[in-house]
Image (tube, rainbow, N blue to C red):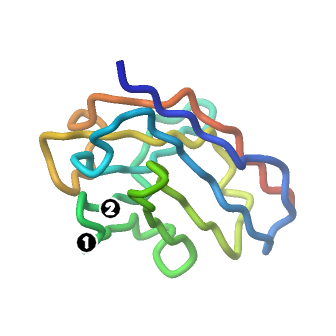
Amino acid sequence: QVQLVESGGGLVQAGGSLRLSCAVSSRSFSRYAMGWFRQAPGNEREFVATISRSDDSTYYADSVKGRFTISRDNAKNTVYLQMNSLKPEDTAVYYCAGTTIYNTPTSVRLYDTWGQGTQVTVSS
């Protein structure tokens, strides 16, 4: 069974940066399109960014465009989320997710494999 393990979360001041990592335990990592989502208390899980299997397409939520960058290293079975210019409203649990069916989906429903999440807290 494929496992996704996120790391890199923590507490940071507004304007700071964090890099999240998601290690995927699959020999077929290159077959997975990957995404990052986040969920703040009382809110639904929302799309943040996605990257295609071949690393040639990326999409971002408008709220993070220009500040966050998603990337992947297929040799390391890892996907990253570089977060710059963080704001208090970025505070949430961040989840990585994967799908072998769709290429760059932005909907929670289209991902079938999820990590356990990592907390990101941005103080003002």
Going by the numbered disc 1, the residue's amino acid type is Ser
Pointer 2 with pointer 1, Cβ within 8 A: yes
Q: Residue at x 25, y 74 (%)?
A: 56
Query: Crowding at label 1, few (<14), some or many (≥20) Cα neighbours within 10 Å?
Result: few
Task: Say whether residue 102 is left or right of residue 2.
Answer: left
Tag count: 2
Q: Please determine whether, in this image, residue 67 is positioned above or below residue 10.
A: below
The quadrant the N terminus occupies is: top left
Which residue is most to the bottom?
66
Query: Crowding at label 2, few (<14), some or many (≥20) Cα neighbours within 10 Å?
Result: many
Secondary structure of the residue carrying numbered label 1 = loop
The quadrant the C terminus occupies is: bottom right
Task: Say whether residue 10 is left or right of residue 107.
Answer: right
Secondary structure of the residue carrying numbered label 2 = strand
Mark 2 and mark 1: Cα distance apart in space = 6 Å
Q: Please determine whether, in this image, residue 12 is positioned above or below residue 77.
A: below
Q: Which residue is mark 1?
A: 57
Which residue is most to the left?
101
Going by the numbered disc 2, the residue's amino acid type is Ile
* Residue 28 position within the rendered picture, expressed as x and y whole percent measured from the top left: 27, 41
Q: Which residue is mark 2?
A: 51
* Residue 20 position within the rendered picture, expressed as x and y whole percent measured from the top left: 63, 54
* Residue 22 position within the rendered picture, expressed as x and y whole percent measured from the top left: 53, 45
Q: Earlier in the sequence, mark 2 or mark 1?
A: 2
